[in-house]
Image (cartoon, rainbow, N blue to C red):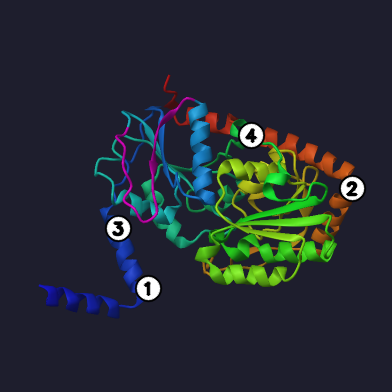
Amino acid sequence: MADRLGFLHRMWRLVPPTLRRAALGFAVRAAAPRPDRVPPAASLGVQIAGEMGRISGLGEAARLLHSGIAALQADAGTIDLAIGKRPVLIPKMPRSALILHVNAPSIPLFLARAPRDFLRERRVIGFWNWEIETVPDSWRKNADFVHEVWTPTLFTATALEPIMPGRVRVVPYPLAAILPPATADRKALGLPAHAVIITVIANLGASFDRKNPLGAIASFRAAFGDRPDRVLVLKLAGASLFPRDFEQIRAAIGTSANIRLIDATWDSARMRILFASTDILLSLHRAEGFGIVPAEAMLRGIAVIATGWSGTLQFMDAQSAALVPYRLVPVIEQRGDYAVPGARWAEPNYDAAVDWLRRLADDPVERASLAARGQAYASAALTLDPLANALQSCGIARLD
């Protein structure tokens, strides 16, 4: 038997990788249960399945959505889709809806491990995030696992509508309603008390090229050189998993003494201190599906400089943030995450970013005025109302 299995394994490895992936994808899709063709008209509360414990943008987003559902008293529990581990499926609440806070390609992988009756008599909603205008064809194949899709921005909804016509709803993360307070403490972070602090926050697992930390470093250095009263805090996550990216960042920083590189996993309390200690949040992204970091910064009354394209425009405009002009260019990306024919994203204008950095750093009155307008705009855009309306439209009742 062992010889036979070994022979079959060797034969399997001779199959071209693209065909192997296609075969595995077909098998997983065949094993995964589908929801009922017509969803129930009414549901009692909603469960959310996602990367609830993971330190990542999708993990944080899933937790934000769950907090909003709980605030609306519709929380029927969570399912943690831990990476590399078999998820623990809690008993489903009778008549509860299900939100799958995972993108379309990952849905069959989760459902293939679920009980065959897991979706029976349930409304199933996909909560999908995507960062560019074109969605991969692989997403279309998995549209039949959900009754409808929620997404946090009009930008992403426009990209998804061709593969889910009439079944896409914009539901921004209700960050304004659930954001805990924060207090500045520069001493605790080892930051100078009287310098202007410009902060960049990036998870290297979320596409190095898309987040564009090298562009942020270059713009800061062009704006301020080695001035000790201007400090860039570059807070990273995932550096150990992407050593090549990390080395590029270190090389870009060089000997600059006014750039603080932080490669550590911080809890939410320490991250709140960093936000509160920041004067300017810089995000020269090439694309964002939503942008939790700039959204939180605006809500906390921090002036934001950001590329003026993609999902961040759900909660900012030219009056509430320092929008950096851009040109749309073909996606060139190391990892192939956005290998979609015709894919484009934004290349920010770095001269404009430098001008904004100098202008806001040198003028505390203008900086405070922009921060106040940003706080008001984001607070109005990221309320609980869209989530409450979505639950009501789907017939999802509160759990009183």
Looking at the picture, how far across and down is residue 127, in whole percent?
A: 48, 44
Q: Using a 10 Å C-alpha cutoff, classify the residue at mark 3 as few (fewer than 14 neighbours), some (14 to 19) or many (20 or more).
A: some
Q: Which residue is mark 2?
A: 363
User: Relative to residue 300, is residue 104 depicted above or below?
Assistant: below
Find out whether residue 76 is within the magenta segment: yes
Q: CA distance from mark 3 to mark 2?
A: 57 Å
Looking at the picture, how far across and down is residue 1, in whole percent?
A: 10, 72
Q: Which residue is mark 3?
A: 28
**Which of pointers 2 and 1 indicates the residue nearer the eye?**
2
Identify the disc placed on residue 59.
none
Q: Using a 10 Å C-alpha cutoff, classify the residue at mark 1 as few (fewer than 14 neighbours), some (14 to 19) or many (20 or more).
A: few
Q: CA distance from mark 1 to mark 3?
A: 15 Å
Q: 3 or 185: which is nearer to us?
A: 185
Q: CA distance from mark 2 to mark 1?
A: 55 Å
* Quadrant (top left, top right, bottom left, bottom right) of the C terminus: top left
Q: CA distance from mark 2 to mark 4?
A: 27 Å
Q: Are marks 3 and 2 in contact (CB under 8 Å)?
A: no
**Secondary structure that dominates the magenta span:** loop
Magenta residues, start to end: 73-92
Describe residue 225's horizontal placement relative to residue 138 as left or right.
right
Q: Earlier in the sequence, mark 2 or mark 1?
A: 1
- The residue at the far top in this view is 400
Identify the disc placed on residue 176.
4
Judged from the image, the secondary structure of the residue bearing numbered disc 2 is: loop
Looking at the picture, how far across and down is residue 283, in whole percent?
A: 70, 55
Describe residue 326's horizontal placement relative to residue 3 as left or right.
right
Q: Amino acid at mark 3?
A: Val
